[in-house]
């Protein structure tokens, strides 16, 4: 090492004359990482079982105190360690996680000084890394102007990506709302609509496997990011767009020194199982504060998805409270315009009435202050600390359980501060928080104990808006377990049993094309600790009794998830466990039915299970069926249909 230093060349900075490579692997040795400083530019590559999943990809930062992306070298020593942690978190896909990883701290030098470390964590399915930047002399803060961090996919890879929208467009200038349509099996070399792609991003490595790229650990100390597409299979980390948040706030994050960036994460596997089952978004973070109380999760209802703005009346909300009680649900979401159409006094009255039914209320709020034009109220309550805390104090006094905060269209650091402030204040008053019109959650379930869920997806409201969204329901639903929902809770608001999106459930408006069993299956496939389902009071009499009975008892908290089969945008079959009860759920978006003999090791071979299934006409039924002696069963899922298999009778 000393000989290398003596032979160093000075080319735009202090460079090693000979490139240095560091190699390390996950606990089982199958995920391998190489870090290099060739040409004075740091890079890394990822292999799985010797097969390349990421080609040499750029690393480095450009700050206002120095360009740390070139003219650098790896330091004298790499520090290797082991991470072995078990944690419990009820609100994610797996209630207890045993996280094991190799930690490699790679110092990076420039001009003879250690300017930052690249900290890697490598598990048996994930690679994660972040930068730790050191002070420069007496300088104890800096602006990170650009990250050179990139991901170079092997030639021939295909993409499953969601384009980032331009800022200040869409409804009332609220974009980006992270609600755009995915393209699937697409070629590389594109850049979405010109603004890159929303995390997470899924890639198929030819016939060799799959790669999921995302980030986690984003809070008020940094901005959230997106992925920018380039030619040659390169995708780089991109900071927020300048026009976001009505142009307010910086696009480049500022950090205290020493300071750290969020984690960039890469999940790899020869099948989709590591993608579906990964917990990397939560493995790398820690709670930022203590929960002020024990929070309650579970199922609920909401009137807006079927009844729209017209449903925002005292009487209709009371009817939905009664409906929630009939279903055994714990909450009702009171959506936009309640402040003007119901009023604060009547909301307090509704909350008291709901309490007598063992039901609690969530209240919708507009996030906006100076960053969009959304007119729905309440407005100006969540954007200001004093107004927000006054409002939350009132909510606590009348027994409100949580809030749904909407229209937060930005990834800037100032916006991350808003998210954090809302969550921290809400915790002080014992309120759960759901976000809509919002960015992807990035480890927030573990970081913020009162965080419940986020939309960040083309959710159920779009099926109320257009027939096109109804027609694409199965296609989109077959994407979310592999991409959006695998890294964080997803507030979808679905599982509709009305045939039409209107209060009369008669012809007119958008028509649901998926089956009732499909609706049951998505209640299992879509993970969120709080689920406000798109059911309506009329479903007590016009929906099949077996379907309503299932929806009365479906859990929202899960202990385990297992991938069984599927392909993004085509079909998906996975299993979730709640206690001793397993639910295997599947749906199909292809024209041809999915027909397969599958093994179900979670069930006892030769025993009977409950099977909710569709025939060719999408007519559903509930039957009991025996597994064979090998624990196998033949299944058929028609287009727009579903299946649910459970050991619960």
Image (spheres, rainbow, N blue to C red):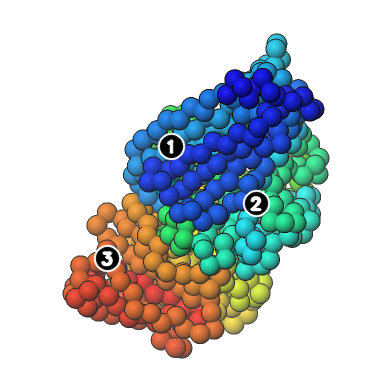
Q: Residue at x 54, y 83 (%)?
A: 591
Mark 3 element type: loop
Disc 2 crowd rating (10 Å Cα; few below 14, some 14-19, many 20+) is many
Indicate the secondary structure of the residue bearing disc 2: strand
Other-residue count near label 3 (Cα within 10 Å), few / some / many at <14 / 14–19 / ≥20: few
Residue 545 image offset from top left, x and y in percent = 35, 75
Task: Check if mark 3's residue and mark 2's residue have beta carbons within 8 Å.
Answer: no
Residues 45 and 121: in front is: 45
N-terminal of the two: label 1 or label 2?
1
Mark sitting on residue 540: none
Kindly identify the residue that appears in the image at 74 percent across and 60 percent down: 190
Q: Is residue 62 visible?
A: yes
Q: Is residue 237 left or right of residue 281?
A: right
Residue holding disc 1 = 102
Q: Which residue is mark 3?
A: 601
Q: Which residue is mark 2?
A: 152
Residue visible at 22% across and 78% down? 628
Task: Say left or right for 148 vs 297.
Answer: right
Residue 316 seen in render: no
Task: Choose mark 1 or mark 3, whichever is in front.
Answer: 1
Q: Nearer the viewer, residue 139 or 313?
A: 139
Would you place residue 511 above or below residue 164 in this image? below
- Find the distance from the CA under tag 1 to the CA under tag 3: 31 Å
State the separation of the CA atoms marked 3 and 2. 37 Å
- Circle nearer the viewer, 3 or 2: 2
Q: Give above or below for 366 relative to 277.
A: above
Q: Position of residue 596 (x, y in %)?
A: 38, 79
């Amino acid at each position: 090492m000393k000989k290398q230093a003596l032979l160093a060349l000075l080319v735009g900075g202090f460079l090693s004359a000979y490139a240095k490579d560091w190699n390390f692997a996950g606990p089982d040795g199958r995920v391998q990482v190489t870090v290099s400083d060739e040409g004075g530019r740091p890079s890394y590559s990822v292999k799985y079982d010797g097969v390349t999943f990421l080609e040499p990809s750029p690393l480095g930062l450009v700050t206002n105190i120095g360009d740390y992306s070139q003219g650098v070298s790896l330091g004298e020593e790499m520090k290797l360690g082991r991470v072995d942690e078990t944690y419990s978190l009820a609100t994610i896909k797996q209630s207890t996680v045993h996280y094991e990883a190799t930690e490699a701290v790679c110092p990076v030098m420039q001009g003879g000084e250690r300017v930052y470390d690249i900290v890697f964590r490598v598990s048996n399915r994930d690679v994660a890394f972040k930068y730790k930047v050191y002070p420069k002399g007496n300088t104890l803060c800096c602006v990170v102007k650009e990250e050179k961090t990139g991901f170079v996919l092997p030639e021939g890879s295909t993409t499953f990506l969601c384009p980032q929208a331009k800022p200040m467009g869409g409804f009332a200038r609220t974009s980006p709302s992270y609600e755009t349509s995915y393209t699937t099996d697409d070629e590389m070399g594109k850049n979405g609509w010109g603004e890159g792609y929303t995390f997470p991003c899924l890639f198929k490595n030819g016939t060799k496997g799959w790669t999921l790229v995302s980030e986690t650990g984003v809070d008020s100390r940094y901005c959230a990011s997106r992925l920018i597409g380039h030619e040659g299979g390169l995708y780089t980390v991109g900071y927020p767009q300048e026009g976001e948040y009505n142009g307010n706030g910086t696009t480049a994050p500022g950090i205290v020194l020493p300071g750290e960036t969020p984690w960039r994460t890469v999940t790899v596997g020869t099948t989709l199982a590591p993608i579906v089952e990964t917990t990397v978004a939560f493995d790398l973070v820690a709670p930022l504060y203590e929960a002020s109380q024990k929070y309650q999760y579970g199922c609920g209802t909401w009137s807006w998805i079927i009844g729209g703005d017209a449903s925002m009346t005292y009487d209709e909300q009371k009817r939905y409270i009664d409906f929630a009680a009939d279903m055994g649900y714990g909450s009702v979401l009171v959506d936009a315009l309640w402040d003007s159409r119901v009023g604060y006094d009547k909301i307090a009255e509704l909350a008291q009435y709901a309490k007598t039914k063992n039901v609690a209320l969530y209240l919708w709020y507009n996030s906006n202050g100076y960053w969009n034009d959304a007119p729905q109220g309440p407005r100006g309550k969540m954007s200001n600390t004093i107004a927000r805390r006054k409002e939350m104090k009132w909510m606590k006094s009348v027994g409100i359980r949580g809030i749904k905060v909407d229209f937060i269209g930005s990834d800037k650091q100032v916006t991350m501060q808003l998210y954090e402030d809302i969550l921290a204040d809400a915790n002080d008053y014992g309120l759960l928080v759901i976000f809509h019109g919002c960015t992807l959650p990035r480890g927030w379930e573990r970081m913020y104990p009162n965080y419940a869920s986020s939309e960040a997806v083309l959710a159920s409201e779009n099926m109320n808006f257009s027939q096109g969204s109804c027609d694409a329901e199965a296609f989109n639903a077959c994407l979310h377990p592999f991409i959006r929902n695998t890294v964080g809770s997803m507030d979808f608001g679905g599982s509709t049993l009305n045939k039409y999106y209107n209060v009369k459930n008669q012809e007119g408006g958008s028509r649901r094309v998926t089956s009732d069993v499909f609706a049951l299956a998505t209640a299992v496939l879509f993970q969120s600790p709080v689920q406000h389902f798109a059911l309506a009071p009329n479903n007590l009499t016009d929906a099949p009794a077996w379907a309503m009975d299932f929806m009365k008892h479906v859990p929202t908290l899960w202990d385990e998830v297992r991938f069984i089969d599927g392909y993004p945008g085509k079909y998906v079959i996975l299993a979730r466990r709640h206690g001793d009860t397993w639910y295997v759920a599947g749906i199909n978006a292809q024209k041809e039915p999915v027909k397969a003999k599958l093994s179900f090791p979670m069930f006892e071979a030769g025993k009977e299970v409950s099977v909710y299934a569709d025939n060719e006409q999408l007519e559903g039924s509930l039957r009991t069926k025996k597994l064979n002696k090998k624990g196998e069963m033949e299944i058929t899922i028609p287009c727009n249909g579903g299946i649910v298999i459970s050991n619960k009778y």
